[in-house]
Image (tube, helix red, strand yellow):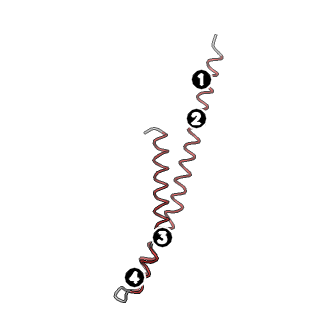
Amino acid sequence: MNRSSLQKKTLVAGVIVGVVGFVLLLSPYPLLDAVYQDARVPNTLYHSWAALVSAVTSFCLPFGAVLVGASLVMRHAEHLTHGAQRADRAADGNTGP
């Protein structure tokens, strides 16, 4: 796997994880309210569901941001590496006979 492929996969994974976290941040509240209003559902199930959604949301948003940031760092490091290689080739060409 080459570096640019890993960088692209990391970026896509970061965006997907971030979107999942954002959707979970916005969407579960109507569902949680409906579960809370239903008398047949035990209170512990409601609180367990709320805790699970909160934990996943708390994980997904920062982890998605970390993956996107790592992708940008990989892109920058790849750019620096290619620039250094070009400079080395240019220097080697200038030192010849």
Q: Of marks 1 and 2, which one's residue comes earlier in the chain?
A: 2
Q: Of marks 1 and 3, which one's residue comes earlier in the chain?
A: 3
Q: Residues within 10 Å of mark 4 (few under 14, many from 20)?
A: some
Q: Of marks 4 and 1, which one's residue comes earlier in the chain?
A: 4
- Measured Cα–Cα span from mark 1 to mark 3: 51 Å
- Measured Cα–Cα span from mark 2 to mark 3: 39 Å
In the image, which disc is placed on residue 89? Answer: 1
SS under mark 2: helix
Q: Amino acid at mark 3?
A: Ala
Determine which residue is flagged by label 3: 55
Q: Amino acid at mark 1?
A: Arg
Whether residue 87 is situated above or below residue 7 in the rendered picture = above
Q: Is residue 91 left or right of residue 24?
A: right
SS under mark 4: helix
Q: Nearer the viewer, mark 4 or mark 3?
A: 4
In the image, which disc is placed on residue 35? Answer: 4
- Measured Cα–Cα span from mark 1 to mark 2: 12 Å
Q: Of marks 4 and 2, which one's residue comes earlier in the chain?
A: 4
Residue at 64 percent of width and 22 percent of height: 91
Observer-nearest residue: 34 or 69?
Answer: 34
Whether residue 69 is situated above or below residue 80 in the rendered picture = below
In the image, which disc is placed on residue 81? Answer: 2
Residue at the top extreme of this rendering: 97
Observer-nearest residue: 35 or 83?
Answer: 35
Residue at 58 percent of width and 35 percent of height: 81
Observer-nearest residue: 34 or 74?
Answer: 34
Residue at the bottom extreme of this rendering: 39
Q: Is residue 70 left or right of residue 95?
A: left
> In the image, residue 60 lies at what x, y percent?
49, 63
Q: Amino acid at mark 2?
A: Thr
Q: Quadrant of the C terminus?
A: top right
Q: Of marks 2 and 3, which one's residue comes earlier in the chain?
A: 3
